Amino acid sequence: MTSSIFMHPATMFIVGALLLPLFKKFNAQKIWLVVVPLLAFIQIKYLPASFGCVEWLGFKLQFGRVDELTMVFLHVFTLMALIGSIFGLHVKESGQHAAAWLYVAGSLGTTLAGDYLVVFIFWELMAFASVFLVWYRKRKRSIEAGYRYLLVHTFGGLVLLGGIFLRYQNLGDLTFVPISPDTATLADYLIMIGFMLNAAVPPIHAWLPDAYPEATVTGAVFMCAFTTKTAVYVLARGFAGFETLAIMGAIMTLYGVGYAVIENDARRILAYHIVSQVGYMVCGVGIGTEMAINGACAHAYAHILYKALLFMGVGSVLEMTGRSKLSELGGLYKYMPLSMIFTVIGGIAISGFPLTSGFISKSMIIAAAGANHQLILMLMLSLAAVGTFLSVGIKLPYFIWFGPNDCGLKPKEAYWNMQVGMFMAAFMCIFLGVYPDYLYDMLPYAVNYHPYNSYHLTETFHLLGFTGLGFYLMVKYLKPHDVSNLDLDWFYRRGAGWFMWVARKPISATNEWVSNVYQTVGLRFTMAMARALSWFDWEGIDWALDGSARGVVKGGEQVRQFQTGKLQQYIGGAVVLLFLVLIVVVLI
């Protein structure tokens, strides 16, 4: 394979999705599900620096732009596509796999895009493909959550498109280039808001914990990996150094952790932790230094793997037991030991334990905040790490696998392909922690950071140790309860209810009243006007036109009597007429 022979990675997944029913017909769907993402993972190494430049309707579009920032995201996206596809091999529905691959294609297309129009095309493909991963669960709550998810992302897409149009009007150029905070315009901020929505930045974040827990088991694994991290990529590409992002990112870390600590549903806990962990990345992008951008990219890479591992772990429990609430689980370590081990590895990785991927990535962002003298941000990020270990590192595995009570279930271990997917993600979590240079060598800037120093190790063990002690002392207060926690999605849920009430009551009543008035008054008036115009047409216009025509014909008949056909009579008449004219002139 050479750099001159390649296919756009997004095209590979689109074509692969379209061919899935054919391979299913020949009982080769599982092979195809492994071959396509594996080829894409191998092929990204051979992509040229620039490709797919076309001109369409006067716009210069670039479907491929590859540099160091692009490559680190392409690498983890294609790797995650392979892991997720293997994890979902047992799923027989070709439609669910096709939706997942089209979703991956949207993410890869956005990552490679060199202009805003191509970004928007693939951005919308992500939204419309991923919603089917929610709907495929085929429950009432999933259908409703999917519609809310789609409406929110449609709104975000319109904000993004408005910013793109304004930017083109201002500059006449759609090239996707970095924007300086000092020269940013309204158009640029609209684009940034569109990106921030997909990054789940509060207060436009509630779609994530609303939709992700309602997705299918396999769908949630894909969704936790692509939407928010693609948003991190475009923010890093276009808006590095915006102080607003640094502040909002730090707030995200604490906001997500706060909700995760009090949640009962395992997948909602993980969904809120996506908000928290993406907050680290958004904060790093906002700080904007080389170390901070490296940290954001490294943490995105690590987060995709350990978060997918956690979703695979709790997804396996849901698949085998039909339950995901902590209050309904406990004592499963006897029956699903491998799933337990993989989930625990994901929990310690997200908590930042040494020798795991979280330790080598999260700390780089915190160090970048300290190096930039942003001590408040540094403190907020460190505090969020405590909440992460408390809720996901300890609480989640404790109440699922151990817990004070045995739930009475005796499930089988997860399917072999699910175990393979979890093993691959768990291996990468440990491998990156043991050999961080593998990830550091991919980052966009040269890395001058060593996570395994005495200060960082001491700080980490102190934070994690005291957090563990706190959980031990307060475990009875952290016992999960089956309650619903309100978030900011309450506003658009209630707003939608109010809108439907207004549509059904006042607007419907007004429409019915107007219809009745039209039928009783307007329709009669219209018919009367029609009869009057018809009478005027027959008696007025037709009379005038027909009468004029008849007058012309009658006059012609009278003039015709003077046409004898004899030349001498015509000459005599002309002479008589001439004498009459002369007489009149003389008399005047």
Image (cartoon, rainbow, N blue to C red):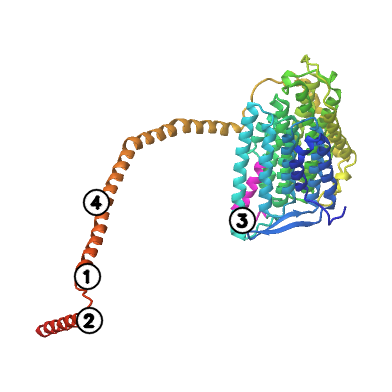
**Local secondary structure at mark 4:** helix
Residue 165 lies in the magenta stretch: no
Q: Which residue is mark 2?
A: 567
User: Which of marks 4 and 2 precedes in the sequence?
Assistant: 4
What mark, if any, has residue 539 been given in the picture?
4
In depth, the one of 388 and 535 nearer the eye is 535
Residue furthest out toward the left: 587
User: Which of marks 3 and 2 precedes in the sequence?
Assistant: 3
Place of residue 88 in the rendered image (x, y in percent of width and height, measured from the top left): 79, 32
User: Which of marks 1 and 3 precedes in the sequence?
Assistant: 3
User: Which of marks 1 and 4 precedes in the sequence?
Assistant: 4
Name the kind of residue labelled 2 in the image: Leu
What residue is rendered at 87% in x and 40% in y?
A: 432
Residues under labels 2 and 3: Cα distance?
86 Å
Name the kind of residue labelled 1 in the image: Arg
Dot 1: few (<14), some (14–19), or many (≥20) neighbours within 10 Å? Answer: few
Q: Which residue is mark 1?
A: 560
Residue 190 lies in the magenta stretch: yes
339 w.r.t. 404: above or below: below
Q: Which residue is mark 3?
A: 167
Residue 555, picture quadrant: bottom left
Place of residue 76 in the rendered image (x, y in percent of width and height, measured from the top left): 81, 43
